[in-house]
Image (spheres, grey):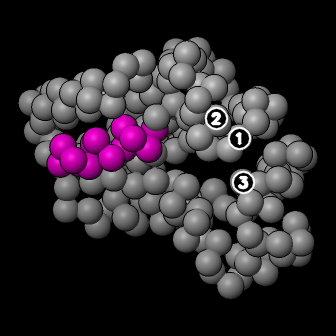
Amino acid sequence: MILRAKDKLVVGLTGSMLSGKSTALSFFSKNGADVLSADELVRQLYQVPTVQKRLLSWFGSWEPAQVARCIFARPQDRQKLEKYLHPQVLKRAAEYIKQSPHKLVVFEVPLLFEAGWNKLTDLNIVVLGDERTLPSRLKARGITAAEYKRRLAGQLPEAEKARRADIVLANRGSKTDLGLKIKRLCRAFEAIYEAK
């Protein structure tokens, strides 16, 4: 299954935890792109009774926070969950993209490279966060430094994501600065790919 569509530019968007992916996604939306989030598709799947039943049998709960505690504590549990959910997320994403009336679709996927989905899109963008503001962002989210490191351990290093990406978007200034970069990027996409 691929995410590319004949009449669309399909962009994969990723970055490390707290890098600003969701903020970037909202700016793409404000600039005329259709946007989609893998995390949102997972949240939708967690509401499906058959999925809830499976999660309950594996983790004793289908509540996202409880499942997250289990999978980040045991890598084999994370792999089992990904093997079960990823095909369903991919199917829903492909259907959404196919039906989208927009020429530019941006799909935010935290594990874009790790899952190999970067090969299914037209091009890929990685958002690099600002290390200087990380402690305040962790505090705002109620995440400990230890939990942050544990979650990052299951992902490629930021430098490797940047190496694999077609475009590296540095989120090291204000939100206004990030918004301006994305506005310019959307204009470039429109000019090069006639995508709007």
Rounded to the nearest angstrom, the CA distance separating label 1 from label 3 is 22 Å
Please give the residue where the numbered disc 1 appears in the rendered image: 143
Question: How many numbered marks appear?
Answer: 3
**Residue 47: quarter of image:** bottom right
Of residue 102 and residue 74, the one placed in the foreground of this image is 74
Question: Which is nearer the N-term, disc 1 or disc 2?
Answer: 2
Farthest residue to the bottom: give it: 49
User: Could you give the CA–CA distance between mark 3 and mark 2, rounded to whole angstroms?
Assistant: 25 Å
What separation in Å lies between label 1 and label 2 (alpha carbons)?
Answer: 5 Å
Q: Please, what is the dominant secondary structure of the magenta stretch?
A: helix
Res 30 visible: yes
Q: Amino acid at mark 1?
A: Ile
Q: Is residue 114 left or right of residue 9?
A: right
32 drawn magenta: yes
Q: Amino acid at mark 3?
A: Glu
Q: Residue at x 63, y 56 (%)?
A: 86
Helix, strand or loop at mark 1: loop
Q: Closer to us: mark 3 or mark 2?
A: 2
Q: Residue at x 55, y 55 (%)?
A: 39
Mark 3 falls on what kind of element?
A: helix
Q: Answer with the quarter of the image where residue 106 lies.
A: top left
- Within 10 angstroms of label 2, few (less than 14), some, or many (20 or more) residues? some
Q: Residues within 10 Å of mark 1 (few under 14, many from 20)?
A: few
Q: Quadrant of the C terminus?
A: top left
On screen, residue 90 above or below 147: below
Name the amino acid type tagged 2: Leu
Residue placed under numbered mark 3 in the picture: 82
Badge number at residue 138: 2
**Viewer-nearest of labels 1 and 3?**
1
Asked if the residue under mark 2 is in contact with the one under mark 1, i.e. CB atoms within 8 Å, the reply is yes
